[in-house]
Amino acid sequence: MTRVLPQNRWRKSWWDRLSVRGLMLLATAVFLFGYPAYLYMDSVITGGIVKRGDLLVVDLKAMSSFEMDQDAGTNEDIPLRYRELDGKRVLLTGQMYEPYEADGKIHTFTLVYSIANCCFNGPPKVQHFVAASVIPGHEAEYSSDLVDVVGTLHVGVQAAYGHVQSVYRIDVERVTRG
């Protein structure tokens, strides 16, 4: 004779047993681990390039995170997704470096994703910097804060005196505080 065990009708499911404190712990864990994982995967998949209206929003840190010979580098050393940005209208967010600005108005500057946090893995590399030139008829004002720079990006190795001088250049239409 087979014996049937009585079912526990009062046992709650795991979801019903979850307390408010348990929910808060679960939400915190998802935020602490899930959000950074999402940001990392998004950057890996898109390469830091997102279309927003008529602009391509490009992550400067992602754009500069590749290895290249600083003396004999060629265009083929630049990842294809960034070479394809040549001649495109982009928005870059970073910090300005211009040691010779006068009265706040500048015509050329260097853009980097972060002056303080750039280049933890050794000396700065030429691909970490974007040479920016303000288009005649436009103005840019120096800011030590993060800025959004809109303009036409030029991608390609320019070398002189046996060293790569620049990889990225931008013709600046406007600069706004980020």
Image (tube, rainbow, N blue to C red):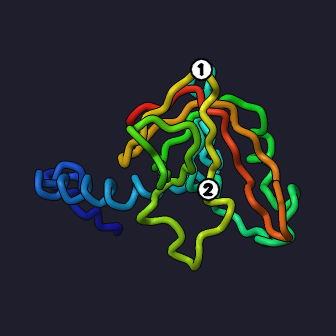
Q: Residue at x 70, y 49 (%)?
A: 168
Mark 2 secondary-structure assignment:
loop
Tell me where residue 44 appears, x and y as whole percent: 62, 54
Residue 56 visible? The answer is no
Q: Nearer the viewer, mark 2 or mark 1?
A: 1
Q: Residue at x 59, y 76 (%)?
A: 123
Q: Are marks 2 and 1 in contact (CB under 8 Å)?
A: no
Amino acid type for the residue under numbered disc 1: Gly
Mark 1 secondary-structure assignment:
loop
Q: Residue at x 75, y 40 (%)?
A: 154
Which is nearer the eye, 21 or 77?
77
Quarter of the image with the C terminus is top left
Place residue 46 in its image quadrant.
Answer: top right
The disc label shown at residue 129, or none: 2
Amino acid type for the residue under numbered disc 2: Phe
Tell me where residue 24 appears, x and y as whole percent: 17, 54
Q: Report the residue marked by disc 1.
A: 137
Q: Residue at x 80, y 68 (%)?
A: 163
